[in-house]
Image (cartoon, helix red, strand yellow):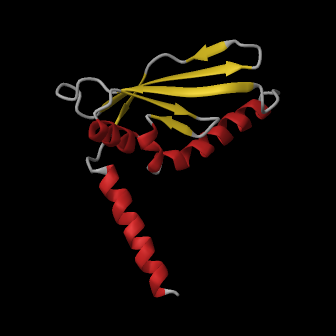
Amino acid sequence: MADWLLNAAKSLQVKTVTLDILNAGIDPGEMEKLPLRDHLPDLKIIIQKELKQNGFDENFIVEAKIKVTIPDINIYAKTLYCYPKLMDQDGREYTAGRIIETASEEFDPFLWNTISKSFWARLKKVFK
């Protein structure tokens, strides 16, 4: 996920990305076209399982977001800073502080999306 986030942010020249886990959204919206969005439901399931295992209703958390900032890429070429924040139904906020993630691969995520769509379109024609 770090690779997709960093490469897409570089392509779009944005310094901040927000992942809205419970609503399966990404800001800026251009990033919602990428496979990143496909992983958000998995994170929601993890939150719900943890809540249930600890005796809470699975709807106890009403907001779950991760703010991702991209530092100066000339200094930290593959680093992301993640700031997760949860809010419960009583309005209490829970934060974990800064989490540092490192991307490993460089690629054009928007080119990949185009290639993937083209591949599936051709494959569908073969099986018609």
**Left or right relative to 78: residue 63:** right
Q: Is residue 12 above or below residue 67?
A: below
Nearer to me, 96 or 121: 121
* Residue 124 place in picture, x, y as percent: 49, 79
Q: Position of residue 104 (x, y in %)?
A: 30, 43
Q: Is residue 81 above or below residue 19?
A: above
> Which residue corresponds to the image point at 33% horizontal and 52% vertical from the top-left?
110
Report the side of 26 relative to 59 (left or right).
left
> Viewer-proximal residue, 90 or 101?
90
The structure residue drawn at horizontal position 34% and vertical position 64%, both measured from the top left corner, is 115
**Residue at left offset 62%, top offset 44%:** 41
In this rendering, the answer to whether 30 lies above or below 123 is: above
Q: Position of residue 50 (x, y in %)?
A: 71, 33
Q: Please say if 110 is above or below 90.
A: below
Instruction: Tell me which corner region of the image, top left, top right, bottom left or bottom right, holds residue 24.
Output: top right
| Residue at position x 23%, y 24% in the image | 72
Residue pushed farthest left? 74
